[in-house]
Image: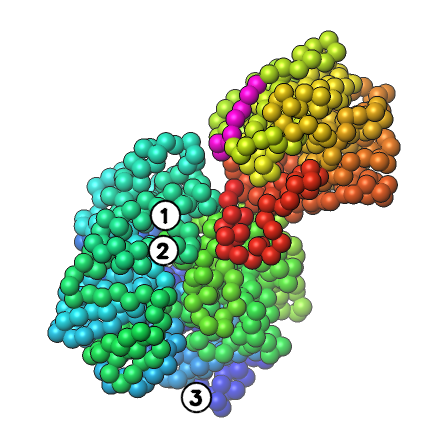
């Protein structure tokens, strides 16, 4: 259908349609920058804005104390260096009026208002398949016909209505922090209630308390609040910015949170109590939300134990600030990890509860029964009020998009229906079935977990650049594929396992809106990684998108942009930046030295009961071993563990983080044995050492502090090979008795023609050429079919129960699966873990690969079953909050 026909149809509905290339909904941070970029790229555009002026969130949120919680030198546009120097912020955290003035200044500087239709609410948007255009109707003025439709509605723009009966019965004044009267509110001498203690409440309560005759705060769930220590912009940050503005901004773009802070590498258990407290006090005094969320220790956001240290330190601060112990206790969050809900920056929030005119009502102890004509009634008392302020938050992320209007895409599909079970997007930018439709900081992007200014600029730049490239290539539509969108959903789920956000009921998950399907909506993989993924989509030929043009022209590069687990991707990218020479090029001694140095930089692992070293005799040698004991009283079942390293590298200490982790999870004793290495000791030395060591440990279990009786064996990589061979030899040679075997990414065969050897030949640290080198050093081709080196070639009947873990991106994957299947076919009880998105080292890199936690939990429970121990968590406890929090610990 021609543009003229589209215009005719529109005029029949409501006047002549305004014809533009792009329509934008919203004139806040996102909408303004979109108009600027679109204009520079040669697109005609219009922004449709319900408010009377620019500002978006900062136009509506005018409640007392409203401020940003990212330092304003970071919460600013960076696209124009001249703009950065033309505006100077007056405070570290600017107030709402100043931010609104800044956005007005930007709109004037770039003459953006001429492309904005104010006081205009969109009432419907419908995709016209024949015309390949969106037709948008409004409540003010003509409809709009556009090629591309972009939602710049913000993540916190749809206030959540109150859920309490009787609001309409109240005879006093009612206000919402998200829609505060522009002329202000006089609360002097009035009896005021604030319902809610989220960010807007925490900012407004101290100022309301100064005006009101009496303030009653109704709190259902306490939140963590941190002092803003507002004032001038910190001199150290300003010096960094001014010394190299470009570098400062680029570091922010590549950071995890959109603010230029480095990644912490020290974990909590490496620090003493005094060191942790010193770090915390420094962060508390800094008054910087991102600092305290990211700079204390590396595990604070990913590990329950590391996070609890922060929680306890903040609770100390609350106890010290609030005089009444009962009030202080009620203000202390105990239902979510610190940072799992967005913490708030405050000014005198906790001290406000020391005022004689402030009362805190704990709704968990006395819930609200009703709002009456004169006030609020709880289950135990009534409060007479003049004013009720609802600080009940927003229908976040999706609410702002769906509340604006119905959006109807291809084949009459409604976005509301498509998102009925939660938002589905590709990159948080696009939705399958909705061509030429984009969202800025939509669900599935870093958005609210980042410095929004940085994320907005990245999104806008990416979208406008794609529209220009689409136009220049002669295409007219762009839409994500079903495969790409499903893959992004899986990646989002994988990313959710990295942090503790999933352990809180919060607006991040939609839990604050009754009936809303819950799921973690923002991308938790970090700002810099997300940016690199978006860039990769482009560099790989618009991977995951279908483009169409005139005369049936089509380009579809289907696929998933991220198949690795997010932390695995980070590890591999870091290794790639180091430009390390291939390990096999270092020679055996050089490779050993490299691995030893690498291991020195890794945390040893969490504290356990006891660690002891010794040697055990084998034919012609004494093998070193290290015993890892639980902190609980023994004796404990004994696991004989064999390290990885291709029969060439490693020792009894090289997998120490993994051994410690498994001791903690199993409550069992691990004896890690250092077998002799090739090329000095070629096959069958490692195999025979493994068997001899297992027999010796079984015979001396009591002396080592273990439980006498059957032992278990475990091993990773070549150590998995040694463990598997040991089980076969123990069966054939009359003992020792082995209760079970844990084989992690084991070498089981000498064949190199399986698909995993070819599919994962390079790029995943363990390469095909490295495996060739290991094999050549360890075993001559003539010996490789011997079951003592290729256990898959041996008899697999009557072996101990086995748990076999394999990783998707590992050359050894298929032979590990083949060994598990062969044992199962022979009647051996076998459990398999096929770890999606992981690589060969995932399970032993305990300190950095957080997404392997669930796999290590499964391994631990399997070992306990093999040893005849009860599960650590009884059946049915999996759904309890305690179990969820414990399961998240790494």
C-alpha distance separating marks 2 and 1? 8 Å
Nearest to viewer (mark 3 / mark 2) = 2
**Left or right: 811, with 494 as reference point:** right
Q: What is the residue that sits farthest to the bottom in this orientation?
A: 12
Q: Mark 3 highlights which residue?
A: 15
x and y, in percent, of residue 880 in the image: 53, 56
Report if the CB atoms under discs 2 and 1 are less than 8 Å apart.
yes
Q: Which mark is first along the chain, 2 or 3? A: 3
Any part of residue 468 in sight: no
Picture coordinates of residue 787 (x, y %)?
84, 27
Q: Closer to the N terminus: mark 1 or mark 3? A: 3
Residue drawn at 82 percent across, 43 percent down: 824
Circle 2 residues within 10 Å: few <14, some 14–19, many ≥20: some
Secondary element at tag 3 = loop
Q: Nearer the viewer, residue 860 or 26?
A: 860
Residue in view at x 53 percent, y 24 percent: 611
Mark earlier in primary sequence (2, 1): 1
| Residue bounds of the magenta highlight | 606-613
Q: How many marks?
A: 3
Magenta span contains residue 609: yes
Mark 2, residue position:
333
Q: Is residue 652 above or below residue 88?
A: above
Helix, strand or loop for disc 2 = loop
Q: Residue at x 56, y 72 (%)?
A: 420
- The residue that mark 1 highlights is 311
């Amino acid at each position: 259908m021609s543009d003229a026909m589209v215009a005719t149809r529109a005029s029949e509905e409501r006047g002549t349609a305004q014809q533009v290339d792009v329509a934008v909904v919203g004139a806040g941070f996102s909408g303004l920058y979109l108009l600027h970029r679109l204009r520079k790229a040669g697109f005609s555009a219009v922004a449709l804005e319900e408010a009377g002026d620019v500002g978006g969130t900062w136009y509506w949120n005018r409640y007392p104390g409203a401020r940003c919680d990212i330092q304003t030198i970071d919460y600013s546009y960076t696209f124009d260096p001249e703009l950065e120097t033309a505006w100077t912020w007056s405070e570290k955290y600017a107030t709402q009026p100043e931010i609104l003035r800044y956005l007005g200044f930007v709109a004037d500087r770039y003459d953006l208002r001429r492309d904005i239709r104010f006081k205009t609410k969109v009432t419907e948007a419908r995709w016209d398949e024949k015309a390949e255009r969106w037709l948008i109707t409004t409540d003010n003025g003509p409809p709009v016909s556009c090629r591309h439709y972009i939602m710049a509605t913000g993540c916190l723009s749809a206030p959540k209505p109150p859920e309490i009966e009787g609001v309409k019965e109240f005879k006093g004044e009612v206000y919402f922090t998200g829609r505060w009267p522009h002329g202000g509110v006089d609360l002097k001498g009035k009896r005021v209630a604030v319902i809610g203690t989220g960010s807007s409440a925490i900012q407004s309560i101290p100022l309301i308390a100064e005006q009101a005759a009496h303030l009653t705060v109704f709190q259902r769930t306490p939140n963590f609040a941190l002092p803003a220590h507002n004032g001038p912009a910190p001199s150290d940050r300003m010096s960094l910015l001014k010394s190299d503005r470009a570098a400062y901004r680029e570091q922010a773009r590549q950071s995890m949170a959109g603010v230029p802070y480095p990644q912490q590498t020290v974990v909590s258990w490496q620090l003493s109590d005094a060191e942790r407290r010193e770090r915390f006090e420094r962060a508390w005094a800094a008054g910087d939300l991102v600092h305290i969320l990211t700079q204390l220790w590396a595990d604070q956001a990913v590990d329950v134990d590391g996070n609890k240290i922060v929680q306890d330190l903040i609770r100390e601060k609350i106890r010290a600030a609030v005089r009444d112990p009962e009030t202080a206790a009620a203000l202390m969050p105990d239902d979510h990890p610190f940072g799992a809900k967005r913490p708030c920056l405050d000014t005198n929030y906790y001290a406000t509860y020391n005022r004689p005119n402030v009362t805190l009502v704990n709704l968990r102890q006395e819930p609200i029964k009703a709002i009456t004509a004169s006030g609020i009634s709880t289950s135990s008392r009534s409060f007479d009020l003049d004013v009720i302020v609802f600080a009940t938050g927003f229908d976040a992320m999706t609410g702002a998009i769906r509340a604006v209007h119905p959006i109807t895409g291809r084949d009459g599909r409604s976005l509301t229906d498509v998102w009925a079970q939660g938002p589905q997007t590709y990159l948080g930018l696009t939705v399958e079935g909705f061509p030429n439709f984009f969202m800025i900081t939509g669900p599935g992007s870093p958005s609210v977990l980042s410095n929004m200014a940085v994320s907005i600029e990245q999104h806008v730049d990416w979208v406008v650049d794609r529209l220009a490239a689409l136009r220049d290539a002669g295409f007219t539509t762009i839409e994500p594929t079903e495969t790409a969108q499903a893959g992004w959903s899986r990646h989002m789920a994988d990313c959710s396992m990295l942090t503790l956000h999933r352990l809180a009921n919060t607006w991040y998950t939609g839990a604050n809106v009754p009936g809303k399907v819950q799921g973690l909506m923002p991308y938790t993989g970090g700002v810099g990684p997300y940016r690199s993924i978006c860039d990769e989509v482009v560099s790989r030929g618009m991977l995951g998108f279908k483009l169409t043009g005139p005369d049936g022209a089509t380009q579809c590069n289907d696929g998933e942009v991220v198949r690795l687990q997010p932390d695995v991707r980070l590890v591999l990218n870091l290794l790639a930046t180091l430009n390390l020479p291939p390990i096999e090029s270092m020679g055996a001694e050089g490779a050993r030295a490299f691995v030893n140095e690498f291991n020195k930089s890794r945390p040893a692992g969490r504290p356990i009961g006891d660690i002891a070293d010794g040697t055990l005799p084998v034919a012609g040698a004494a093998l070193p071993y290290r015993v890892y004991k639980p902190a609980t009283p023994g004796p404990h079942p004994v696991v004989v563990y064999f390290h990885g390293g291709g029969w060439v590298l490693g020792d009894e200490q090289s997998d120490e983080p993994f051994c410690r982790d498994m001791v903690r999870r199993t409550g069992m004793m691990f004896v890690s044995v250092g077998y002799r290495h090739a090329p000095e000791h070629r096959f069958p030395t490692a195999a025979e050492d493994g068997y001899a060591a297992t027999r010796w440990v079984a015979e001396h279990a009591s002396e080592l502090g273990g439980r006498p009786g059957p032992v278990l064996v475990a091993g990773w990589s070549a150590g998995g090979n040694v463990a598997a061979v040991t089980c076969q030899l123990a069966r054939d040679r009359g003992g020792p008795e082995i209760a079970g075997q844990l084989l992690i990414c084991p070498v089981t065969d000498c064949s190199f023609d399986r698909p995993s050897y070819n599919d994962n030949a390079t790029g995943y640290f363990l390469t095909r050429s490295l495996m060739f080198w290991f094999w050549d050093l360890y075993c001559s081709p003539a010996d490789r079919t011997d079951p003592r080196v290729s256990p898959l070639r041996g008899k697999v009947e009557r072996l101990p129960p086995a748990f076999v873990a394999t990783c998707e991106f590992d050359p050894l994957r298929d032979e590990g699966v083949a060994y598990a299947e062969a044992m199962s076919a022979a009647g051996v009880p076998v459990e398999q873990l096929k770890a999606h998105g992981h690589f060969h080292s995932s399970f032993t890199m305990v300190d950095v690969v957080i997404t392997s936690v669930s796999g290590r939990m499964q391994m631990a429970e399997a070992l306990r079953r093999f040893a005849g121990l009860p599960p650590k968590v009884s059946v049915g406890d999996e759904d309890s909050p305690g179990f969820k929090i414990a399961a998240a610990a790494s």
